[in-house]
Image (cartoon, grey):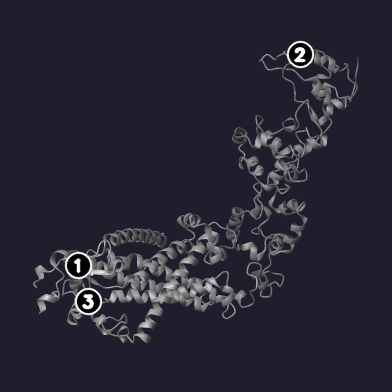
Amino acid sequence: MTSDARPLERYIARFDPFDRFLHFLLMVTFLGLALTGLPLLFSTHAWAAVLARLLGGFQGAGLLHRVFAFGMLACFGMHLARLAYRLVVRKDWGILWGPHSMVPQPRDIVQIAQNFRWFMGRGPRPKFDRYAYWEKFDYWAVFWGMGIIGGSGLVLWFPKFFARFIPGTAFNLALLIHGEEALLAVCFIFTIHFFNSHLRPEKFPVDKVIFTGVVPEEELRHERPAEYERIAASGRLERLASPPPTSATLIWTRISTVLAVALGLLLVFLTIRALLG
Amino acid sequence: MFAVGVSAANGAPAVKPPPNEDCLSCHGDKDAKRADGRSLFVAQEKFASSVHGQAGLACVDCHASLAASTEFPHAEKLPPAQCASCHADIVSDYGKSVHAEARRQNGASVAATCSDCHGMHDIQPAKDPASRTYALNVPATCARCHGNPDVIRKGHIKIGNVAALYEDSIHGRAVLKSGLVTAPNCKTCHGMHDIRRSSDPAARVFRGNVPSTCGSCHQGIARLYDEGIHGTLFRNGDKRTPVCTDCHTAHHIRQADVEAWRLDAVKECGNCHAESVESFRDTYHGQVTNLGFARIATCSDCHRAHDIHPASDSRSTVSPAGRVATCQKCHPDTGEKFARYDPHPNPKERARNPLLFYASIFMKWLLVGVMAFFGLHTVLWFPRSWRARREGNGAEPPPREGEKR
């Protein structure tokens, strides 16, 4: 069978439904938390007061913020539970080290350098595997953010309980790092993550893979050569082959991503204007 | 008929003064007019029921220049009615007022004289609910000028339409809407005849006299203010210390639990305590306040409004001993550990909270570091990707699965 005879639209499964669900939940709760939290962070700006009124005052915005916070912590909890399951039950040690692990490895350092060389036109693009270094950074940034923002958020949510163990000055610290880390998250996700994963020319306007779960085989071959080779070598390509996403999935993806990107860009625009002004 | 009421005291008149009937033979005619067409009619029954009519005064008791006149009809232009001939003390009080001062400086001034507030022939005693000077009517009487844009402009009244502010104030509502005669109207604070400028040390509304003026009704509050740090500073002659009107305003005094007022009060405190308000604004209390909601602690909820004491004073609500109870007002079931919260943190002040200081620096540099690295990463990546769409990315993709075999 030659390549020309191959159907052009062969897709390869990359993310299972659970991963896609977690990304979607993370996306919705992150946008919700940013929308309901930014007014407090930039409370002296006129738009913040307008937004707070629209969200039902500080009580309404506060309630929504807690609802989204619960959703995000549930998302984090489900992810941790799944990691534990894969480690303890499935003995999948590969998630701790190796080509499909999120753990940073020497190869990532090398690829950062190689990628910068490629940016300057001084070398070929590195052969990325399942997770490129910027994706690992995204992942660990969220992981760290969950701990920092989630932890400080819980302290602020239940001050009476926490005051039994820690002094009141901890609330000062919690509010500071909650806000500063949230600011970093908003600035990062709505600019760097948006560009790296969705808005860059190869993917514009959105990389649908995390929503549909499948990637065209050709795209995988070009974007993730190491992963493609590895899958092909292990003979799993046939097993991972999937039909193209249905039009219903594509419509749903288009609507939710356009809304998410629009809201994210609006929020980061307001944030950057507030930081500069 | 020779009715003689209270006669002028300037010796024996050579001519018998004309009785009211003589005056009314012209002034009782509804159609009688001056040369310029204005009516010269005086409503007899109105005068008869007025305080002066009831007392049996004759027209010439006030229009004294006509008492000795024999030429009738008299000249059109007469000296004004002489209130001072009976009310000498009051007219002398009036002479000290801002109104009289304005008239002295400019004869054509629109500033009020006796008749502007009391009326002319129909003057009623202030106790009479129909009187212009009755407690509930005073605001409307003053508003005839102080709520009239034309007079305000001509009289160069700097404070502007003060009647509208008063009308919307808690005092104005009490008088005008609730009909409380005990609530303050204009004259309660400004006095009556000797109304003086607020810059005049003798004025009841002079800054230095404000606490005692307000305190004449708000006695309980005045005592608290007096004991507090602001009252103490005031007594010691500190010019920066706030008096009642600095926080409450003079005319637009609002109910203390109105959200807009609570928010304004924070700004007012910030006029002197700028640093404290700035650090407050960075806390959750302050952020919510900034957004325009006041159902959260503002300055006075912790420090109190009138009996404010320095934290070093054991009477203070924010003293180490009093703090727990203060926090508990909003946060019941909390204790000493909770109350160690700093309502005025300043991450720039290392000594105040070293942990906060270093955390703030760390978070700032984390933000700058991450955004700088990935910002550069993106700026370099974008043009490369743009070109790569046409030229390929410079790396050979691995062969397709089929081609390998």
Label 3 chain ID? A
Q: Kindly report which numbered mark, 1 or 2, lies closer to the viewer in this rendering.
A: 1
Name the mark on residue B29: 2
Q: Which amino acid does label 2 sit on?
A: Asp
Residue drawn where x is 77% and y is 55% of the image: B219
Name the mark on residue B384: 1
Q: B55 above or below A122?
A: above
**x and y, in percent, of residue B316 in the image:** 69, 69
Distance CA(mark 2)–CA(mark 3): 117 Å
Q: Which amino acid does label 1 sit on?
A: Arg
Distance CA(mark 1)–CA(mark 3): 34 Å
Q: Confirm whether residue B347 shows in the render.
A: no
Closer to the camera in the image, A14 or B212:
A14
In this image, B64 relative to A220: left or right?
right
Q: Name the residue under label 3.
A: A239
Q: Is mark 1 on a helix, strand or loop?
A: helix
Label 2 chain ID? B
Q: A162 above or below B163?
A: below
Q: Quadrant of residue A126?
A: bottom left
Distance CA(mark 1)–CA(mark 2): 103 Å
Q: What element carries label 2?
A: loop
Residues at discs 2 and 3 both on one chain: no
Count neighbours of disc 1 (C-alpha within 10 A) and say few if under 14, some if 14 to 19, many if 20 or more.
Answer: some
**Earlier sequence position, callout 1 versus callout 2:** 2
Q: Kindly report which numbered mark, 2 or 3, lies closer to the viewer in this rendering.
A: 3
